[in-house]
């Protein structure tokens, strides 16, 4: 597939066509915020890899249903479940519905997230609480329900050598400070320590918890950063690999982290960022 990225330093970049083995056959996965951007690509990648998938959504039922239909096209089961991840009652109801439909959960992808940006002194408490509530508390609430089920059920060797896997969608901004986005960066820094603390506590139960730290990925959350040639050129100054990330870049990484191929990977963040965390300013400065 030819890249649609504005041409910056490289001529037409061609994305490799990579087939994901059916490494997740028989596993049951839930992806939050799965009807857009990264969550959509992750849900499709998990389905392609053989998992049955719950597509969580909060607005946009039609988009969720279309993704369910696409996933079913891979010969696996899928369903859409509505639920606001920041609401305890709705999260618990979503997991109850999933158990009713699929019996259990093997893989949780804590993906739902939002930005509400503002200069620090103009940031409202509402926008602080909203971002923390969805991005951090939402991941806690979903992870807690998944862990309860992983512990109840334990390892089923025919399915996976782990009792369960959680992949937290963090960001490069768990380590890169971000002016004008203090609520968002705080939520992602919080995810990092929650993920590590959970992993330390739960690894003895054969529960694996890791994060992905995407760099700039082409989705609706950051349209302003890539939709004009000027914005794209400015963005490329932050990306040594000189292309924007595509949602499928994250989908493939999630499949690996959710599969037994990464069984000894515990409590770490995999940055999928074209080198954004490599301090690109120092390629000429310092
Ligand atoms: P997006 O805006 O396309 O998707 C966000 C999804 O979360 C949507 O499906 C939305 O409906 C859902 N959502 C929002 N509030 C929700 C709630 N209360 N309950 C359930 N679902 C809710 O954005 P994108 O880029 O796909 O973001 C997905 C995740 O990736 C987020 O956690 C974001 O912070 C993270 N991320 C994105 C990067 C990027 O460059 N696009 C880079 C690093 C991290
Ligand atoms: C943000 C995007 C941003 C990217 C790189 C993500 O966490 O959601 O808006 O483009 O980080 O800065």
Image (cartoon, helix red, strand yellow):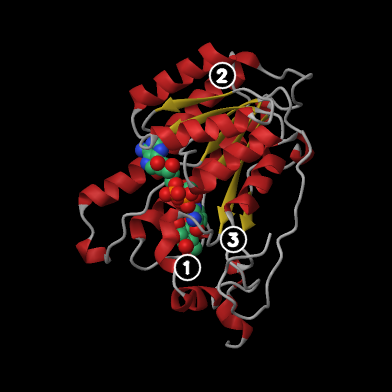
- Mark 1–mark 2 distance (CA, rounded to whole Å): 40 Å
Mark 1 C-beta to ligand 2 under 8 Å: yes
Q: Which quadrant, please, contains the C terminus?
A: bottom right
- Residue 30 visible in the shown view: no
Q: Is residue 286 left or right of residue 24?
A: left
The reply, left or right, for residue 163 in relation to residue 172 is right
Tell me if mark 2 has few (under 14), some (14-19) or many (20+) residues whose alpha carbon lies within 10 angstroms of its own: some
- Give residue 263's quadrant in the image: top right
Which residue is under mark 1? 226
- Residue 37: % across, % down: 50, 48
Any atom of ligand 1 within 8 Å of the CB at mark 3? yes
1 and 2 marks in contact (CB < 8 Å): no
Q: Residues within 10 Å of mark 1 (few under 14, many from 20)?
A: many
Disc marking residue 245 = 3
Residue positioned most to the bottom: 285
Using the rendered view, name the quadrant where residue 230 is placed: bottom left
Q: Quadrant of the N terminus?
A: bottom right
Q: Earlier in the sequence, mark 3 or mark 2?
A: 2
């Amino acid at each position: 597939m030819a890249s649609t990225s504005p041409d910056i330093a490289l001529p037409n970049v061609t994305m490799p066509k990579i087939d994901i083995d059916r490494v997740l056959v028989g596993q049951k996965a839930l992806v939050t915020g799965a009807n857009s951007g990264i969550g959509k690509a992750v849900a499709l990648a998990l389905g392609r890899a053989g998992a049955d998938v719950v597509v969580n959504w909060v607005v946009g039922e039609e988009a969720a249903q279309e993704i369910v239909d696409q996933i079913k096209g891979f010969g696996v089961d899928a369903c859409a479940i509505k639920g606001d991840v920041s609401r305890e009652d709705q999260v618990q109801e979503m997991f109850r519905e999933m158990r009713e439909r699929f019996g259990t959960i093997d893989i949780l992808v804590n993906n739902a997230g939002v930005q509400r940006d503002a200069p620090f002194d103009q940031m409202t408490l509402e926008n602080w609480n909203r971002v923390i509530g969805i991005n951090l508390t939402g991941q806690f609430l979903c992870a807690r329900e998944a862990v309860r089920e992983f512990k109840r059920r334990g390892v089923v060797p025919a399915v996976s050598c782990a009792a369960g896997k959680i992949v937290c969608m963090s960001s490069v901004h768990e380590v890169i400070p971000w002016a004008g986005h203090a609520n968002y960066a705080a939520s992602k820094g919080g995810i990092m320590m929650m993920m590590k603390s959970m992993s330390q506590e739960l690894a003895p139960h054969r529960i694996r918890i890791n994060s992905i730290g995407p760099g700039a990925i082409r989705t609706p959350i950051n349209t302003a950063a890539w939709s004009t040639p000027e914005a794209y050129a400015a963005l490329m100054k932050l990306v040594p690999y000189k292309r924007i990330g595509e949602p499928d870049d994250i989908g493939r990484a999630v499949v690996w982290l959710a599969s037994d191929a990464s069984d000894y990977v515990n409590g770490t963040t995999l940055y999928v960022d074209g080198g954004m965390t490599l301090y690109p300013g120092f390629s000429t400065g310092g």
